Image: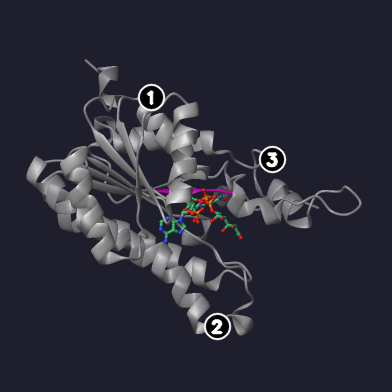
Amino acid sequence: MFDMKSFRLDGKVALVTGASYGIGFGMATALSAAGATIVFNDINQEAVDKGLANYKEAGITAHGYVCDVTDEDGINATVAKIEKEVGIIDILVNNAGIIKRIPMLEMTAKDFRDVIDIDLNGPFIVAKAVLPGMIKKGHGKIINICSMMSELGRETVSGYAAAKGGLKMLTKNICSEFGEANIQCNGIGPGYIATPQTAPLREKQADGSKHPFDQFIIAKTPAARWGTPEDLQGPAVFLASDASNFVNGHILYVDGGILAYIGKQP
Ligand code: NAP
Ligand code: GCO
C-alpha cells in the first residue's frame, strides 16, 4: 500500500548551497514544508543575513553559514560545523552557481575557469564533504542543479555549458560510486526560470517591448512562459524523499517542455 509519508522529510537535515534567494531559496522552502531542517550558505555574511531574513519572513528558522563552494578547506570546516551544530546532512542540493555570458573569442581563460570552478568544482567539493556522513548514516540524497545547457549549447555561454554538461556526468558518477551505500544522486535541469540570474534576458526594451531573448524563450517553450522557482519545488521534494529511492543518476528536466519542442513557427 503506497504511503504518502514517503514524500516527507521529517527529521532530515538539508543543505542547499547558494540559497539566500532564487531557485535555491524556492527549493529550500519546499524541503522545509516537507519537514526538513534547512541549512544554506552564501559567500558573505551580508548575503547570509539577507537569506536568514528571507527564511524568517517565510516562517522558516534556517541555519546560514558563510562559505564559498570553491573553498575546499572552508567547505570541509563548515560541514563539520553543521554536523556539530545542526546534524549530519541527509540531503545536499548543489545549487550555487554563476553564469558569464561572453562570446568565446572574447572570454578569457580566467572567466572560463571561474565558471567551471563554481558550477562544477564547487558541487564536487561539497558532495565530497557530505558523503562520509551519508555513508555513516546509511542513506543520502544529492541533487545537482544542472541546466538546459547540460544538453544544449548556445552563443556566449561556453563556460557555463561546459560546467553544466560536466555536472550531469558528475551526477552519474556519484550515482555509480555510491549507489551501494544507499545514496541517490540525481540532477534537476531547470528550463528558463525568472530569477536574478536571468533578469538581463528579460529586461524590457526602451520601447516597452519584450527583450528579444524573452520572446525567443516563450516561442521555444510549449508552456509559453518562463518558469518560476516554485515550479522546481515538487521535483526537489520528490528527489530529496524516500519516494525516489530507486531513482539514481537521473537528470529531471523541469523546463516546460523546451527539450521536447522544435519551437513555435515565427
Ligand atoms: P542566482 O539568482 O544568481 O543565485 C545564485 C546563488 O548562488 C546566489 O545566492 C549566489 O550568492 C550563490 N553563489 C554564487 N557563487 C557562489 C559561491 N562561490 N559559493 C556560494 N554561493 C554562491 O541563480 P539562480 O537563477 O537562482 O540559479 C541557481 C542555480 O540554478 C544555479 O546553479 C544556476 O546555474 C541554475 N539554473 C538556473 C536557471 C535559471 O534560468 N535561472 C536555469 C537552470 C539552472 P551571491 O548572491 O552572494 O552571489
Ligand atoms: C542563458 C540562461 C540559461 C539559464 C539556464 C537554462 O544565458 O542561456 O542563463 O543558461 O540560466 O541554465 O537552463
Q: Which residue does the numbered mark 1 point to in the structure image?
A: 33
User: From the viewer's perspective, is 213 left or right of 117?
Assistant: right
Distance (Cα) linking label 3 and label 1: 29 Å
Residue at 18% in and 38% down = 87
Distance (Cα) linking label 2 and label 3: 35 Å
Residue at 21% in and 15% down = 1
In the rendered structure, find residue 224 and report the number of the disc placed on it: 3
Q: Amino acid at mark 1?
A: Ala
Q: Would you identify the image quadrant in which residue 70 lies?
A: bottom left
The earlier-in-sequence mark between 3 and 1 is 1
Q: Nearer the viewer, residue 237 or 92?
A: 92
Q: Secondary structure at mark 1?
A: helix
Residue at 58% in and 41% down = 256
Q: Residue furthest right?
A: 207
User: From the viewer's perspective, is 119 left or right of 80?
Assistant: right
Q: Which residue does the numbered mark 2 point to in the structure image?
A: 108
Q: Is residue 59 visible?
A: yes
Ligand 1 within 8 angstroms of badge 3 C-beta: no
Q: Which residues are magenta?
A: 188-192
